[in-house]
Image (tube, rainbow, N blue to C red):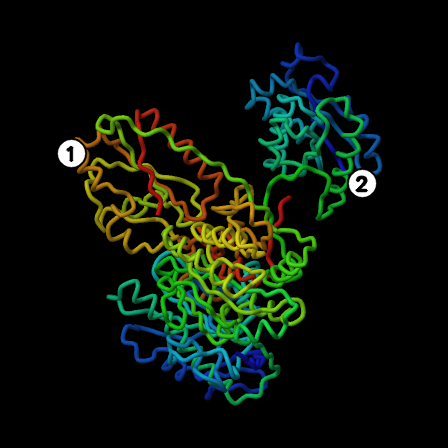
């Protein structure tokens, strides 16, 4: 079997082109190793060959990300690699972010493994850790001698096709696996160990949640512009955007202009996580359009935003929910909304 | 309370002139089964029976419930007391089981809220019911029926069918007999005075239509937490009324074979003293959650337990019940292990639960329900394939033109069962 092919991505500094003053160099490629690639070559010579090196200036990458991404990806792909090494980028922020972005490009487009090396506080790690195997390094290039063997070890494990890879900082991705024993047996075994004071290992380390402080109260509600937003799935009859009943991938924006009160004919819920009967009978139970329109008519609120936003919270990933929230919030701000009534289920 | 469970191994199922077990094959008289399952219910428009066996290229969609045929041969009461048998005290005596057979109910149900069982292919790996010989009942109600009534009609059809088939086990000599016993509390504590006392906190999904569970026929959302001898579950004290997000709702079959109870009994008298169960519910309001979780911890404390396993049913809103139960128990010094599943997103990168506690340091997971799989084309589809575009865990376009389905394992009946019925788990990479 022939040796595996590796492409190495580094910045202008490690390529020996120059420091900050050369950070705007455009992507370039050269066959074989450059800079720290030499040390990787020594570690990996039995199993792989570094067939090419792609270099890009850190500033150029961040300032021309679309162009740089396309060019770098094409250059990497031209070598038909089995694996890509990025960095190590230690605690160099822009280099870490660029190396992480390259990892994402390779992961999503070429579907081959990426190995990197970063200091845990490098901002590139948090942004891109799920796209590669990033080995923990020291915070400066002075620790290069330690980083190279550690990264090479992960490269070897990946090229050998090992199922269990060790020695990198967790990507934070949950992956399903079948165990020997069923869950109830594992629970009983875990309990016995916990009772007896023996070591036990949780299968799911509970996360620490983000907590959002409520915004200060609206000073004068009779002057405020109010919008309605819901994760309870309130949509126009027929669910025109086909929002999923669980694990929503989108949200909808719907006009309130012609609706003063929901009826079984003009509204329904798309949500699959609760009894839909009462919501479908009268969707005001999920989104209080009838009451808010009355309050509007009575001058109890300043004005009402013309649209409501809706998605389904049922089983929807936090990442999607964050994305929807950010986008909806931005649009509401642009439309001059002062306060939101946010309903769930 | 002592129960002998006599398992009669069923290796095949076939239609026949008489409903009986012969050499490991369950023969089913179709007409009699149709009559028994219908039970004179005038709300039924049509009812038909199909067979689906392990390895068949068959898909059942949408699945409402799965029920194991059982029968009481000695001791009080009948299976599913308070529902289709008189509400006697069950859990003692002898029960026979057609082990390897299952009744599966399907039909156009209420909305977008049911599961899939594939008897072969990728989906079969995830559902426990690809390994059972299934007697599938497809039932459609009369047109004018209300949704809540529809749910009740098909639920009872399944129980009646399982009850009828279970009768065939009555006079058959079991292939194996397993004995389970938990004594009255003081006697049970005295029996193994040196072993740590363990209680199982058995949380039942009770959020509303298609999210109901029944305890001796009582709607469990209206109960306050209460004690149960573990063996009561094996006689159908707990029955399913739900199927939404089918991956982590407990079919009645799983309650009848309640796995945490079985596995606690396996260590009973050896490493632990399994003194009983506390059943509790998972209602939607904070007031209900507080009441139930406070009372659960109180009952576990009253029993004098040193440790507890808490199982969840469902996800999202019930994650709060799981966390409240954990906090309340651990605050009383009761060592706790939790059983849950995860919704970590299709890429596995999101937070898995809707609530969290640092006291939850011992968690068993049944896997990430958001993982997407492709279910291959089948030769036979029993039910209504078009619901594959709307059931929880699918999306518009999940059902492909050729009949294959791309969807989250959330759509697969029992795939991430939180009573720990399966071997599926998850890890962080």
Real-space CA distance between mark 2 and mark 1, rounded to the nearest whole angstrom:
78 Å
* Nearest to viewer (mark 2 / mark 1): 1
Which residue is found at the position 67% from the left and 61% from the top? A180
Q: Mark 1 belongs to which subunit?
A: A
Residue most extreme to the bottom: B171
Which residue is found at the position 70% from the left and 55% from the top? A198
Q: Where does residue B15 sit, x and y in percent of width and height?
A: 48, 82
Q: Is residue B358 above or below residue B82?
A: above
Q: Nearer the viewer, residue A77 or A177?
A: A177
- Using residue B257 as the reference point, say whether residue A280 is left or right of it: left
Query: From where the camera sits, is residue A80 visible?
Result: no
Q: Where does residue A150 sit, x and y in percent of width and height?
A: 77, 34
Mark 2 Cα-neighbour bin, 10 Å: few <14, some 14–19, many ≥20: few
- Using residue A159 as the reference point, say whether residue B129 is left or right of it: left
Q: Secondary structure at mark 2?
A: loop
Q: Return the disc, 2 or 1, that comes first in the chain's sequence.
A: 2
Residue at the disc numbered 1:
A297
Which residue is found at the position 27% from the left and 76% from the top? B42
Where residue A179 sits, quadrant-wise, is bottom right
Q: Is residue B80 above or below residue B333?
A: below
Residue at the disc numbered 2:
A2
Q: Secondary structure at mark 1?
A: helix
Q: Nearer the viewer, residue B51 or A94?
A: A94
- Using residue A175 as the reference point, say whether residue B386 is left or right of it: left
Q: Nearer the viewer, residue A179 or A235?
A: A179
Which residue is found at the position 24% from the left and 50% from the top? A282
Where residue A146 sits, quadrant-wise, is top right
For residue A79, the mark is none
Residue most extreme to the left: A298
Q: Where does residue A68 sit, x and y in percent of width and height?
A: 59, 22
Mark 1 Cα-neighbour bin, 10 Å: few <14, some 14–19, many ≥20: few
């Amino acid at each position: 079997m022939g040796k595996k092919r590796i492409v190495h991505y580094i910045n202008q500094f490690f390529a020996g082109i120059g420091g900050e003053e050369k950070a705007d160099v455009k992507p370039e490629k050269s066959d074989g190793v450059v800079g720290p690639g030499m040390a990787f070559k020594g570690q990996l010579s039995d199993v792989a060959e570094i067939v090419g090196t792609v270099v890009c200036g850190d500033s150029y990458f961040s300032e021309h990300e679309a162009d740089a991404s396309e060019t770098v990806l094409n250059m990497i792909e031209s070598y038909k690699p089995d694996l890509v090494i990025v960095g190590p980028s230690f605690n160099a922020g822009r280099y870490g972010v660029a190396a992480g972005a390259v990892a994402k490009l390779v992961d999503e487009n070429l579907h081959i493994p990426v190995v990197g090396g970063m200091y845990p506080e490098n901002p590139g790690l948090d942004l891109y850790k799920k796209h590669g195997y990033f080995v923990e390094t020291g915070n400066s290039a002075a620790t290069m001698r330690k980083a190279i063997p550690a990264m090479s070890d992960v490269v070897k494990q990946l090229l050998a096709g090992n199922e269990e890879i060790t020695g990198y900082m967790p990507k934070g991705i949950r992956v399903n696996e079948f165990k020997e024993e069923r869950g109830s047996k594992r629970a009983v075994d875990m309990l016995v160990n916990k009772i007896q004071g023996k070591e036990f290992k949780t299968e799911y380390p509970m996360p620490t949640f983000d907590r959002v402080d409520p915004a200060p109260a609206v000073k004068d509600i009779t002057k405020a512009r109010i919008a309605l937003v819901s994760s309870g799935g309130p949509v126009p009859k027929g669910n025109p955007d086909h929002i999923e009943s669980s694990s929503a991938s989108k949200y909808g924006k719907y006009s309130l202009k012609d609706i003063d009160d929901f009826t079984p004919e003009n509204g329904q819920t798309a949500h699959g996580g609760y009894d839909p009967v009462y919501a479908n009978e009268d969707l005001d139970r999920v989104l209080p359009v009838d009451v808010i329109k009355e309050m509007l008519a009575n001058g109890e609120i300043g004005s009402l935003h013309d649209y409501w936003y809706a998605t389904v919270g049922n089983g929807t990933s936090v990442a999607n929910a964050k994305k929807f929230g950010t986008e909806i919030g931005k649009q509401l701000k642009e439309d001059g909304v002062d306060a939101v009534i946010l309903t769930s289920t | 309370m002592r129960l002998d469970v006599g398992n009669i191994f069923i290796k095949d199922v076939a239609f026949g002139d008489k409903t009986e077990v012969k050499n490991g094959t369950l023969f089913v008289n179709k007409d009699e089964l149709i009559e028994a399952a219908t039970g004179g219910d005038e709300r039924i428009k049509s009812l038909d029976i199909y067979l689906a066996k392990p390895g068949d290229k068959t898909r059942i969609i949408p699945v409402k419930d799965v029920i194991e045929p059982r029968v009481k041969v000695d001791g009080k009461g009948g299976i599913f007391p308070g529902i289709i048998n008189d509400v006697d005290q069950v859990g003692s005596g002898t029960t026979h089981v057609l082990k390897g057979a299952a009744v599966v109910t399907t039909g156009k149900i209420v909305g977008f809220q049911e599961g899939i069982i594939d008897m072969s292919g990728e989906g079969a790996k995830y559902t426990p019911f690809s390994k059972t010989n299934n007697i599938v009942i497809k039932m459609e109600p009369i047109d004018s029926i209300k949704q809540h009534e529809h749910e009740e009609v098909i639920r009872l059809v399944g129980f009646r069918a399982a009850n009828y088939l279970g009768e065939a086990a009555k006079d058959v000599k079991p292939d194996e007999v397993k004995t389970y016993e938990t004594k009255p509390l003081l006697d049970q504590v005295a029996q193994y005075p040196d072993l740590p006392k363990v209680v199982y906190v058995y949380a039942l999904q009770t959020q509303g239509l298609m999210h109901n569970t029944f305890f001796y026929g009582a709607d469990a959302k209206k109960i306050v937490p209460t004690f149960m001898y573990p063996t009561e579950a094996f006689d159908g004290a707990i029955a399913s009324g739900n199927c939404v997000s089918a991956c982590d709702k407990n079919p009645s079959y799983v309650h009848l074979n309640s796995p945490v109870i079985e596995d606690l009994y396996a260590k009973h008298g050896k490493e632990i003293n399994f003194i009983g169960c506390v059943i509790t519910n998972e209602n939607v309001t904070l007031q209900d959650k507080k009441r139930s979780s406070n009372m659960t911890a109180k009952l576990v404390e009253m029993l004098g337990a040193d440790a507890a396993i808490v199982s969840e049913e469902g996800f999202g809103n019930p994650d709060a019940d799981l966390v409240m139960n954990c906090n309340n128990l651990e605050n009383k010094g009761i060592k706790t292990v939790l059983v849950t599943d995860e919704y970590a997103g299709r890429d596995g990168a999101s937070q898995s639960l809707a609530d969290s506690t640092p006291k939850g340091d011992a968690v068993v997971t049944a896997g990430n329900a958001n993982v997407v799989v492709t279910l291959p084309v089948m030769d036979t589809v029993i039910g209504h394939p078009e619901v594959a575009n709307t059931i929880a865990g699918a999306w518009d376009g999940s059902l492909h033109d050729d009949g294959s389905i791309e969807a989250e394992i959330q759509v697969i009946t029992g795939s991430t069962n939180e009573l720990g019925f399966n071997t599926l788990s998850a890890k962080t990479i």
